[in-house]
């Protein structure tokens, strides 16, 4: 396999509050995850619980 070489320069890093952006995004992701939990039965009825992964022991052992 041939060695990959870039054909253009890498873009400049983004400026701004990087830590705040990552922290805010993580918190938003977690809040949206928690917002889905009341609908677990709906997901289970439609066999869509794959997104829960091993977080739910009864599904992980099935």
Image (cartoon, rainbow, N blue to C red):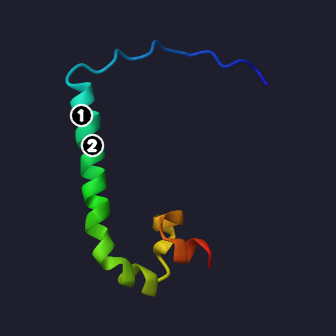
Residue named by callout 1 = 21
The residue shown at (29%, 35%) is 22
Residue 62 falls left or right of residue 48: right
Q: Assign a secondary structure to mark 1.
A: helix
Q: Quadrant of residue 54?
A: bottom right
Q: Assign a secondary structure to mark 2.
A: helix
Rendered location of residue 47, percent (x, y):
50, 81
Q: Which quadrant is home to the C terminus?
A: bottom right
Residue named by callout 2 = 25
For label 2, count other residues whose C-alpha is less than 10 Å away and answer few (under 14), some (14-19) or many (20+): few
Q: Quadrant of residue 45?
A: bottom left
Q: How many marks overall?
A: 2
For label 1, count other residues whose C-alpha is less than 10 Å away and answer few (under 14), some (14-19) or many (20+): few
Residues at marks 2 and 1 touching, judged by CB atoms closer than 8 Å: yes
The residue shown at (29%, 64%) is 34
Residue 26 falls left or right of residue 58: left
Rendered location of residue 12, percent (x, y):
34, 15
Rendered location of residue 16, percent (x, y):
20, 22
5 vs 53: above or below: above
Rendered location of residue 23, percent (x, y):
26, 37
């Amino acid at each position: 396999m041939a060695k990959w070489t870039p054909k253009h320069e890498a873009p400049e890093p983004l400026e701004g509050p990087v830590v705040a952006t990552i922290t805010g995004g993580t918190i938003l992701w977690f809040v949206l995850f928690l917002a889905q939990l009341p609908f677990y039965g709906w997901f289970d009825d439609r066999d869509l619980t794959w997104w829960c992964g091993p977080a739910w022991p009864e599904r992980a052992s099935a």
